[in-house]
Image (tube, rainbow, N blue to C red):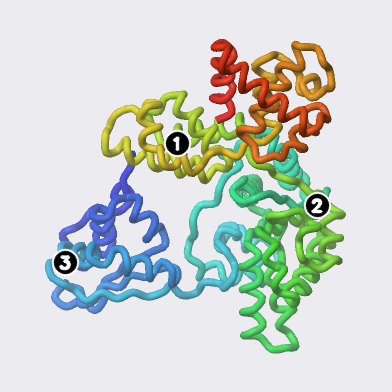
Amino acid sequence: MHSVTDYIPAPTDRPQDCSSPILARIAEKIGEKRFGLWFGQDTTCRCEEQTENIPEKVVFQVRNNFALNSIRRHCSPEIKQAVREICGKDIPIEFSLQQGILPGVRNISEVLPPKNVQEEIPGLRHGLCEHAEKKPAGRRFASLATYLEGLSNRLACRAADLAINHPGEINPMYIFGPTSVGKTHLLEGIWSAIRKKSARQLPMYMTAEQFLSSFVETIRNGSARDRNQSFRGKFKGISHLLIDDIQFFARAESTQTEFLQVFDTLRNQGVQLIFSGDRPLRELTLRSELIGRLEAGMVCEINLPERELALRICQAMIRHRELPIDDDVCRLIASRFGVHARQISGALNRLHLHYLMDNRPITLAVAENVLSDLLRLNRRDIRLQDVGKAVCEEFGLSEETLRSKSRVKQISAPRMLAMWLARKYTRSALSEIGLYFGNHSHSSVISAQRKIDRQICEDATLAELVQKIERALE
């Protein structure tokens, strides 16, 4: 495993070159994880006003106020000690914010091709491009290579392929789904794939908050006559516009008006428009004209990952971390924390830390002990579909057969067991369970529950079968 110091120059004997060694020494003191969290790749350190080769001041430049406050709160003692060790004595320390960041636009320097490519494209020196040299490099965007496809996101993946290889053919695209299902990852992956495919294509990615912030900043600084034109000029020359979380436009009527103007202008120019949100279009409190334009394109839903996809996500995270984890542990995490990728990552973070402390392979018993509190708090929401699928797999039935009204014992017995499991593991009402499993009444569900309760006590084989299905559900 690499450490932060692998990427930072080693300390030298010259005090005047001590800025990078200071960062390296801080990384050694607080650890790689904390250094990456609070400092990242954007924080710089420089020594100023040197006297007799000893700096009189050390200045840390950070990206924003959040990072500044975090570093001061969490890392001040380590910073002072690192400066003392590298410089040989206590040196005054100052913090400042980096300048020249275009308000509201994320990673704008990454939107631009290399300088020699910029000069080959007419008009590219205008609008956003004039800010390229001022914007510090941001974090690396996600890649489609790490975006795993499953039944829950297949349509969105096909839409992404279309946007990359045939831009403008279906326009606009709207991708929606609950939090942590990969919408931002997909948009960033599209951006990365477009840049990799051709330097002449200029995709722009931003969040709705950043669009709003940039628009407000333009209004604040520009004259009433030309401020809107100035803002629209920021989008000149782009090939794709990707905006994340457009539900945030709901609280700004004037921003929606401007967004409509940008939308129409870019679509008429053949620019591929891709947006994401956390809910269906008709649940967005946006202007009807904007909803209508989005409905005219392609709308794709990303659902919570199915169990197979959650398992693949977990396996990919384990490979990336190079953790010695049993397959049984992977299945446990995918089944109990597989609601979305962030929960899987959180569980693996705890196991990773335990492995670093204990330095022994993580078995199922170890994982259950380390994650015991999380397992209690994060019981997976089980749906009627999950119960039906687990019972069908055990008895070799199709879901259509299980949900039929057939009274044949080979079908009615598994159906009663499914109703019993649904009462135990789902939050569905009696009427919902009966309707789902063959359009039966709520009294039929109660009867099935009582019958299975009695049979489990009398039949050890059935009890073992129930435990097997329950393990599959959990």
Question: Which residue is more in the foreground, 139 or 340?
Answer: 340
Q: Position of residue 383 (x, y in %)?
A: 67, 36
Q: Quadrant of the C terminus?
A: top right
Identify the image quadrant of residue 232. bottom right
Whether tag 3 and tag 2 are in contact, CB under 8 A, the answer is no
Asked whether 455 or 164 is in front, the reply is 455
Kind of element beneath mark 3: helix
Q: Amino acid at mark 1?
A: His
Q: SS class of the residue under badge 2? A: loop
For marks 1 and 3, give the CA distance.
Answer: 37 Å
Tell me residue 65's x, y (percent).
43, 72
What number is the disc on residue 320? Answer: 1
Kindly identify the amino acid type of the residue bearing the numbered disc 2.
Gly
Seen from the viewer's position, the closer of residues 298 and 123 is 298
Circle 1 Cα neighbour tier, 10 Å, few/some/many (<14 / 14–19 / ≥20)? few
Quadrant where the N terminus is found in the figure:
top left
Q: State which mark lies toward you, 1 or 2.
A: 1
- Distance from label 3 to label 2 (Cα)? 58 Å
Mark 1 and mark 3 lie on one chain; the one further toward the N terminus is 3
Say whether residue 12 is left or right of residue 65: left
Q: Which x, y percent locates residue 126? A: 66, 72
Eye-nearest disc, 1 or 3: 1
Q: Name the residue tied to disc 2.
A: 168
Q: Is residue 214 above or below residue 6?
A: below
Circles 1 and 2: CB distance less than 8 Å? no
| Up-down relation of residue 364 to residue 81 (above or below) | above
The circle on residue 134 is none
Q: Residue at x 73, y 36 (%)?
A: 430
- Determine the residue positioned at 83% across, 22% down: 404
Nearer to us in this view, 393 or 103: 393
Q: What is the CA distance from the residue labelled 1 to the residue labelled 2?
A: 35 Å
